[in-house]
Amino acid sequence: MDLNGISAIVTGGASGLGEATVRLLASRGAKVVVVDMNPEKGEAVAKDTGGVFAQADVANPEQVIAAVEAAKELGPLRALVTAAGIGWATRTVGRDGQYDSAHDLDIFKKVLEVNLVGTFNCIRLAATAMSQTDPLAHNERGAVVTVASVAAFDGQIGQASYSASKGGVVGMTLPVARDLSAIGVRVNCIAPGLIDTPIYGKGEGSEAFKDKLKRDVLFPDRLGTADEFASMAIELLSNSYMNAETIRVDGGVRMPPK
């Protein structure tokens, strides 16, 4: 699928994996709607790449519909990348063995709401708009790339909510791809490993922490980059024979329990 002249939506597009994907899409000629909760960063990325910013909670139908409508104004909507997500580290049972110290259920629900429900919300609404576009060769109308994590497979201690949410993203890849085959929309999923993004902060302490993290990466001996993630996202969007797959972009890492 040719990305030149299409419109695309990238959630979490103001920083990290999402921002790198926005920039690479724009370099390929796509007009991108940057969806994020941070207006300052989101506006800056959109301005820098010739796109538009839409502030939206990915689990909010009205706000996502507004972003989809903004994308339709830029050109035929044919690409969605769902890079928005949150994490929370909490053990299932507290150290004191009291009910009150067990994993907060509202936190568990919130992580699932953003990472899993939000991802599906964006897919269902963006794909609806894609279904209204004129078909390309072989009746293709668009492509979706969702973002899981290696935590979907190698969840660590304290990652119950995060791993459950990302496992759900992996789990719905095939059935949603089967659903959307009827309208000519492909669905693939990326499960990134340890990627060097602003989430780790800056400075000597941050570098020491990242140096420790990379110990379980098989090869190369470093964390991944946001650009390496983005390049895989672009391949999955543009390669019309890639469908219903989950691909780990992780340097061969297999996460230990902690």
Image (spheres, rainbow, N blue to C red):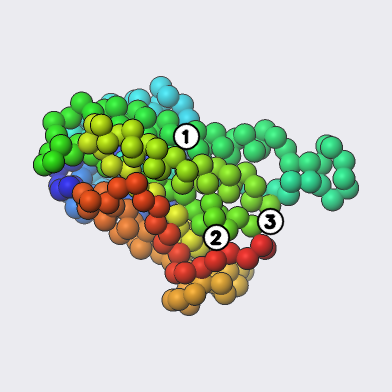
Is residue 216 found left or right of 1 in the rendered image? right
Q: Earlier in the sequence, mark 3 or mark 2?
A: 3
Circles 1 and 2: CB atoms closer than 8 Å: no
Q: Residues within 10 Å of mark 2 (few under 14, many from 20)?
A: few
- Along the line of sight, the residue nearer the viewer: 238 or 70: 238
Q: Looking at the image, which residue sits at the far left?
A: 137
| Nearer to me, 1 or 82 | 1
Mark 3: which secondary structure?
loop
In what element is the residue under mark 1?
helix
Inter-mark Cα distance, 3 to 2: 19 Å
Residue bearing mark 3: 157
Q: Residue at x 63, y 65 (%)?
A: 256
Q: Which mark is residue 118?
A: 1
Residue nearer the viewer, 210 or 98: 98
First reached walking from the N terminus: tag 1 or tag 2: 1
Look at 34% across and 46% down and name the residue there: 244
Q: Amino acid at mark 1?
A: Gly
Do residues under tags 3 and 2 come within 8 Å of each other at their CB atoms?
Answer: no
Q: Three-letter amino acid code at disc 3?
A: Ile
Whether 254 is drawn above or below 240: the answer is: below
Q: Which mark is residue 200?
A: 2
Q: Are marks 3 and 1 in contact (CB under 8 Å)?
A: no
